[in-house]
Amino acid sequence: MLQSTLATKTSKENPKDEHALNAQLLVRAGYVDKVLAGVYAYLPLGTIVLRKIEQIVREEMDRVGGQEIFMSSLHPKENWIATGRWESLDALFKLTSRYDNEYALGATHEEEVVPLMGKFIRSYRDLPFAVYQIQTKFRDEPRAKSGLLRGREFRMKDMYSFHTNTTDLDTYYSRVIEAYRAVFSRLGLDAILTEASGGSFSKLSHEFQVVTETGEDTIFYCKQCDKAVNKEISDRGLCMTCGAVGAPLRASEVGNIFKLGTKYTDPFDCSFTDEHGASVRAVMGCYGIGTSRLMGTIAEVTADEKGLAWPESVAPFSVHLLALPGKKADIAATIMTRVRSLYDQLTAKGNAVLFDDRDVSAGEKFADSDLLGVPLRAVVSEKTLASNSVEVKERKSSDARLVTIDQFLSR
Amino acid sequence: MLQSTLATKTSKENPKDEHALNAQLLVRAGYVDKVLAGVYAYLPLGTIVLRKIEQIVREEMDRVGGQEIFMSSLHPKENWIATGRWESLDALFKLTSRYDNEYALGATHEEEVVPLMGKFIRSYRDLPFAVYQIQTKFRDEPRAKSGLLRGREFRMKDMYSFHTNTTDLDTYYSRVIEAYRAVFSRLGLDAILTEASGGSFSKLSHEFQVVTETGEDTIFYCKQCDKAVNKEISDRGLCMTCGAVGAPLRASEVGNIFKLGTKYTDPFDCSFTDEHGASVRAVMGCYGIGTSRLMGTIAEVTADEKGLAWPESVAPFSVHLLALPGKKADIAATIMTRVRSLYDQLTAKGNAVLFDDRDVSAGEKFADSDLLGVPLRAVVSEKTLASNSVEVKERKSSDARLVTIDQFLSR
């Protein structure tokens, strides 16, 4: 993409109303913009990153047999009354249509998925299965000051599995833990499996936590077991596996999985006929990943004082190509032609390239490049062209090195 | 995909509360399910179709330089007050948070996109650009009885272009008309460019209308000009190009484009500095395509009495492979092994195959295949295997023919 045509621009100043590092950098770099407290719009660069994160999540859910669906955000009030959460879930947004229908705005989707998929569950032969969606969630959160880490409107992948019994659920639950590890690994995140409270869902749950000073949670990490326990269920931080005392760390939750049992199949009478003709309640698991929160977390843990530093897997571009044409008009024109040709060749080979073709100073180009955080910077100037070369530098490396254009093109 | 693992099932009976053909078929076939009047959940097969439609729309918007963004559904009340539509747009859903914030639920996004993108418009050099999103819209519609053709919650691609003057807008507007033609052509739809009222947006607009008996609009089609005019602006149906009287047809709108001028840049003071240093208001166009409505329209216009009949470009699978193992246990086992191997080979070659491996009657498999509407049906039975063949039939053809397995695999 030609940077001169990009609809957004970077900003030198931190937005006044953003306190979280992830939001400060993402807003300054033009990835997102705040619409309301806890509500963000994704701009062109941010949309690419969000879609890449969501595609990785999608691929790993597909790999464990998840079938993608897309449920609604307007939910019938009756469903939420059936589970008791119309009254008990404080964060539930409610709205009334001009025809006096009352709706809940989807804060989570147990109340929709159980009656929806329950229609297709008759016999034990219909189970197990898992369905997931990648969708916007709405929660009337009290605090919404952590940028993308806590939103009133945010993106989430939520998967729901249905089983004949808890043994089958346990087996699938373990497979999903491995799928989650694969997701976070592909995103370049070191996510710690953490035992936590089940909240309104179940007794216990598992979270995946990424260590970051601005995280909202405190976890006790046991190095021996490579596991943690959330402070909310263990004041003393004893490892639930080996009993050792864990090290307290600030962390941000990026995934959360629950064994729901029959908590939501009970109110909707979601049952199947077993091998002996008896009616048995289906058993459920649910598995969440906050994809917009992941974007904020990745931004926050990979950034340095100069700006963002995306891992290759989610970066909006692989290469940031900077043309430094200099001030002599004829030489500048020649340089721009050659860089444009290099850009065309790189793009034709399938590289996602952001080409800084703007008529701004070299200093501004370098500063913007650091802020935008594309993994590889490639600079072309009169000097590099003299040796038929490009000066390349990885975003977080301090070493820039010359490589010949031929070598660079063979990447 | 193995049909035995598909989380949904077909139904023989029409849903009682669906009057529109598209919804009857899509619900019976398990593509969607109704959550509320005008609100649908997309099941696994429907989600594939919806995503394919949206990907085609995305590719064509990218081709005319559209930059994808993703705005919020919660909008600040102030923005809607600024344009006067907080009061005037009856279909606007409003909600109040427990902290007394009032929000609009995104019915359309002019009120969000102008302040959002206006931040990046300073000089004439920053223009033109176009941004688009593919997102859920919410409208408190009075009638919601047309299945996916009119929803209270529906999917839409909305693009917004920003220009220095109306001549530049006119040029881009014409390019988008061609992009829309490309979208509808790839979707297998014959969409007629139709002059229509601008509604609350502008004086005149253009719609793309697909002729169907259950459409909500009446258009007058001029064969000479291959254009139409919507009845809402022309009782007598005179062609606005040649003046001839057009033929009245029932049609369903699948796209709608407007020259907004400064209607929405005025209230938000979205201006730029021109070449002479003067402050000038930016000029806008907006371009909508209802992607869930498109799914309903395609379903409706391609279906026959047996069921759905998707065009290849949006079909959930390319091939529906039916195994008819018969009743002799040993022969059946051999046949299933061979069909499974055929399925593996087809899939390995990149074909999207739905393999009906279920233990149900041949009649049920054929009926389901017609209802599901996969473009090509391939049947393998003891009889076809005797000649090392597969019996193939296009969904709407009455001719089934034998082709050798080798030929079939080379497709």
Image (tube, coloured by chain):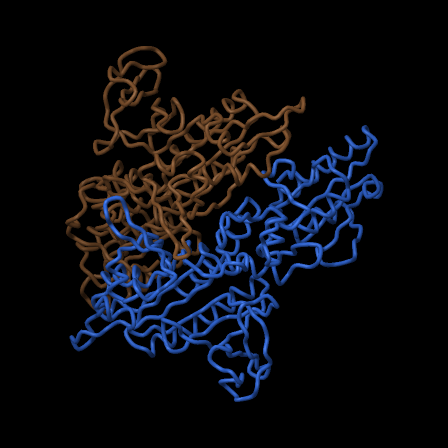
Chain colours: A blue, B brown
Disc count in the image? 0
Percent position (x, y) of residue A279? 18, 74
Farthest top residue in view: B243
Residue B331, by quadrant, is bottom left
Of the pair B407 and A3, the residue shown nearer to us: A3
Instruction: Using the image, determine if residue A145 lies above or below residue A409.
Output: below
Percent position (x, y) of residue A4? 65, 36
Percent position (x, y) of residue B59? 48, 39
Of the pair A296 and B302, the residue shown nearer to us: A296
The residue drawn where x is 23% and y is 59% is A78
Percent position (x, y) of residue B98? 39, 57
Is residue B18 shown left or right of residue A257? Answer: left
Task: Specify the quadrant that holds the N terminus of chain B.
Answer: bottom left
Residue B342, visible in the rendered structure: no
The residue drawn where x is 50% and y is 47% is A35
Is residue A59 shown left or right of residue B315? Answer: right
